[in-house]
Image: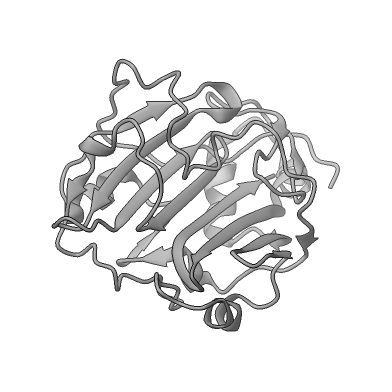
Amino acid sequence: MNKTRTTLAQSVCRFLIYPAAFCFLISICIPLAAVGTQADWPGYRSDNSDWWSFTRIPDADEENISQRREPQPSTFQILGFNIDDAFGKVMAKLGKAKVIERGDASTGRSQICYSSPGEHKTYLIFEKGEVNDAVYLFSRGPDWKGRDLCVDSSVVTKNLSTASGLHLGQTTAEVRAILGKPSVATANKLVYSLGVEKKTSAENFEKLRRQNPGLSQDELHQNYDSYTLGVYIEARFVNGKLTYLAISKAEGY
């Protein structure tokens, strides 16, 4: 696509930062959804101990292969939320959580964390980056700074799944049955690096028109008739069972 965009307050012109080779060059990114009450908690801005986050990684992984397709929309839904819903909406159902701010510029990210009650934790984390929204579901892994700020919720359990049926404890075959052929497959990991161009809905086109009053109708259609959807999904396995799931998506014009 050869499109120009009007500069908005929090927009950037960069490659999508994922550990995948589907990185698309975009000239501006859709503004993030309202985060609600957000705070910059001291001591986290320069912290990268959140090993589960891909937004923190500044360099793309050239081993991965982009596929020109998208997963079913239910892949991006969990507990009735879309992964790009505002944090305030999530907090209204799961309880108020502290918003942790980490990184800067292309690796800047806001996170809220929920966990299952009890000793053996399952974690559900929502994240908003500069150009992407992500959700993480996992039950194993190293400690990280800020884990003590995760809020216990009875709806977070080891059986929690996306609307498409992805959940911890599944085998590689079960994950493949839902997501299809992976971009990269190893003994303990499946990676999906997906990208596709989509037509802008009438509702979103109208929002973009209101946000850009200085553009003519022809310019609006030239710039906003379609957008690029980039998706990164990673599933990690221990002893053949899913213990970590990351789903990230970005939409750029």
Side (left or right) of 48 relative to 218: left
Which image quadrant: the C terminus?
A: top right
Vertically, is 241 above or below 223?
below
Residue 82 coordinates in the image, percent (x, y): 41, 60
Q: How is the image coloured?
A: one colour
Vertically, is 33 above or below 247?
above
The answer to which of 15 and 42 lies nearer the viewer is: 42
Q: Residue at x 79, y 58 (%)?
A: 65
The answer to which of 51 and 39 lies nearer the viewer is: 51
Considering every residue shown, the one lying at the far top of the view is 42
Vertically, is 211 above or below 45?
below
Side (left or right) of 119 relative to 232: left
Q: Residue at x 43, y 26 (%)?
A: 102
The answer to which of 119 and 117 lies nearer the viewer is: 119
Q: Residue at x 72, y 40 (%)?
A: 60
Residue 3 coordinates in the image, percent (x, y): 80, 40
How many discs appear?
A: 0
Residue 32 visible (yes or no): no
